[in-house]
């Protein structure tokens, strides 16, 4: 009986402490739209030939064409990462088992394009190289941390305004900040109008437009305030 009374007393104390806990929790989101400073183009060179030497020669030839196109579009060689190269045997499966087809050589490449006005021209020329496979591009910012700090600060201010209005409507005042938590901060997929299909020879050989738009960066925060 004594143990039961002690447990009941602790339970009542716990509920009393909860009742005395007066706080408000709010969430807010902020965002900005800003043009990227540069982009990274991810691609690869691939060739499959009867011999390893022939496949390597084909990839080397394509690499020279890539460097020539990059130079025409004002891309410095220091902005081209092409250190990864690999090879593997290629087989085709049939009823008798697998049949050796030759050797494949692959070279992974990342091009950093700092002059965004050259994007259409560079991509158009690269797609004319048969061995090239373009895997996609990423928009980048010179000082992303500064941009994230800016939108986080805006989100915190928005949360404060929201909490103040809610507290006033409830007949209370805000006290100190009890907790603050960042929910997210990210750069979404590039907002671009683009086509990666290989371009056919036509009456107008000029490159199709690659429309790079402003990128939206967002951040969300959740704050808890003491209520007076």
Image: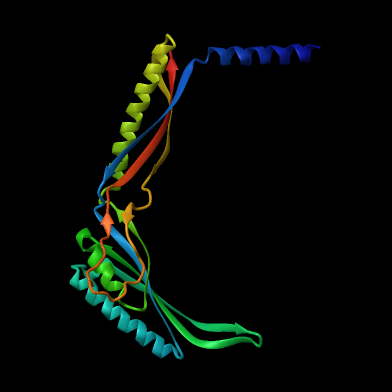
Using residue 67 as the reference point, say whether residue 191 is left or right of it: right
Which of the colour schemes (rainbow, by chain, secondary structure, one colour) is used?
rainbow
Q: Quadrant of residue 73?
A: bottom left
Q: Judge by depth and name the residue closer to the eye, 165 or 130.
A: 130
Q: Position of residue 88 (x, y in %)?
A: 49, 81
The furthest residue to the front:
203
Residue 53 location, quadrant: bottom left
Q: Which residue shows up at 42% across the image and 8% down it?
A: 171
Pick whichever, 125 or 59, lies toward us.
125
| Placement of the C terminus among the 4 image quadrants | top left
Horizontal and vertical percent position of residue 154? 31, 32
Q: Residue at 37% x, 38% y: name it.
A: 219
Residue 59 lies left or right of residue 14; in this view the side is left
Query: 118 or 3, which is in the foreground?
Result: 118
Q: Is residue 222 left or right of residue 70?
A: right
Q: Residue at x 33, y 83 (%)?
A: 60
Residue at the spot x=45%, y=82% of the render? 104
Q: Residue 200 location, x and y as percent?
A: 31, 74
**Furthest-top residue in this view:** 171
41, above or below 221, in the image: below
Residue 227 picture quarter: top left
Question: Which quarter of the figure is the N terminus placed in?
Answer: top right
Please count the marks in the image.
0
User: Does residue 54 lie above or below 184 as drawn?
Assistant: below
Q: Nearer the viewer, residue 24 or 193?
A: 193
């Amino acid at each position: 009986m004594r143990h039961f009374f002690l447990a009941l007393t602790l339970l009542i104390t716990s509920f009393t402490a909860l009742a005395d806990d007066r706080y408000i929790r709010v969430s807010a989101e902020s965002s900005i739209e800003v043009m990227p400073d540069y982009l990274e183009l991810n691609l690869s060179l691939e060739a499959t030939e009867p011999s390893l030497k022939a496949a390597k020669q084909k990839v080397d030839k394509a690499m020279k064409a890539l460097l020539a196109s990059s130079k025409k579009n004002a891309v410095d060689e220091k902005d081209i990462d092409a250190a990864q190269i690999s090879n593997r045997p290629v087989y085709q499966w049939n009823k008798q088992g697998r049949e050796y087809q030759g050797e494949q050589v692959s070279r992974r490449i990342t091009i950093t394009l700092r002059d965004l006005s050259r994007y259409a021209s560079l991509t158009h020329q690269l797609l004319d190289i048969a061995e090239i496979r373009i895997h996609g591009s990423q928009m980048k910012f010179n000082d992303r941390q500064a941009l994230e700090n800016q939108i986080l600060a805006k989100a915190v201010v928005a949360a404060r305004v929201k909490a103040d209005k809610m507290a006033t409507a409830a007949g209370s005042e805000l006290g100190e900040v009890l907790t603050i938590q960042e929910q997210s901060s990210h750069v979404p997929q590039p907002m671009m109008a683009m086509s990666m299909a290989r371009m056919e020879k036509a009456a107008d050989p000029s490159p199709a437009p690659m429309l790079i738009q402003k990128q939206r960066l967002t951040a969300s925060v959740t704050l808890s305030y003491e209520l007076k």
